[in-house]
Amino acid sequence: MPGASFEAVTGRLGIGAIAFLGLFLIVDGTQIGVFELLEAYGSSVTWGIVGVVPTAVVIYIVGVFCLGVAELLLARFAAFRDPEPKDVLAISRSGGALLQQSYADHMRNHELLKGAAVSFLILSGGAMAEFPNMRGYESIVWLATIGSLALSTLSLVFSHRAVAQARHLARTARSAPDA
């Protein structure tokens, strides 16, 4: 089985980074002093060398978890379900490389946007957890919360659009005379 593409890995890292920031803000919002502790460790050269790779791995895993949570939560809704196996078969039998690539792109976007919706929800929770620490800057916290909720919603809208386009391609491939 081939490994994940560079785009899939970076997408998971991006989703994980957003969620990781949200989780950090939640911890920092509930435990005063976490930010300062990380600042102290982060400024050392040793921590910079030793901590980067494990942190990147954890961020990747958090991204994969976000994708899994999104799949668990959204699979109940027909609008977010992946196309049927017969659709994938029709696309693979079509023989058209452009059609197959377009289908794969839509499906990859669908998966990543569902995961992004979860990560933006976590970020929204993190922004709200920082509310007590941001006296005098409450409007920024509200803006961050509303902004991340809006990005979560937009991620779901565009995810739905991507899977609808993939389904349309599959229907077209199934209805083609030589399919």
Image (spheres, grey):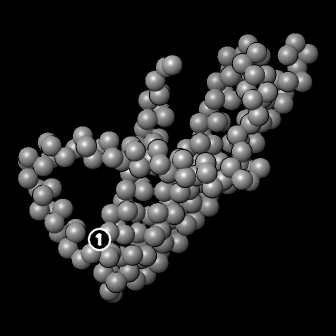
Answer left or right for 110 relative to 41: right
Question: Which quadrant of the structure image shows residue 123?
Answer: bottom left
Could you say where residue 58 lies in the image, as x and y percent from the top left? 33, 46
Question: Which quadrant of the structure image shows residue 134?
Answer: bottom left
Answer left or right for 39 relative to 124: left
**Identity of the residue drawn at 79% across and 22% down:** 90
Answer left or right for 106 relative to 2: right
Q: Is residue 127 above or below residue 89?
A: below
Q: Is residue 137 visible?
A: no
Could you say where residue 84 lies in the image, as x and y percent from the top left? 76, 34
Could you say where residue 142 lies in the image, as x and y percent from the top left? 47, 78
Q: Is residue 83 above or below residue 22?
A: above
Q: Secondary structure at mark 1?
A: helix
In this rendered view, identify the residue nearer to me: 50 or 7. 50
Find the residue positioned furthest to the bottom. Answer: 136
**Identity of the residue drawn at 56% across and 56% down:** 117
In this rendered view, identify the residue nearer to me: 123 or 68. 68
Q: Is residue 111 visible?
A: yes
Amino acid type at image mark 1:
Asp
Q: Which residue is mark 1?
A: 28
Find the residue positioned furthest to the left. Answer: 45
**Identity of the residue drawn at 19% across and 46% down:** 51
Quarter of the image for the C terminus: give it: top right
What number of labels is visible? 1
Q: Callout 1: few (<14), some (14-19), or many (20+) C-alpha neighbours within 10 Å?
A: some
Answer left or right for 178 relative to 32: right
**Identity of the residue drawn at 50% across and 51% down:** 66
Could you say where residue 26 lies in the image, as x and y percent from the top left? 36, 69
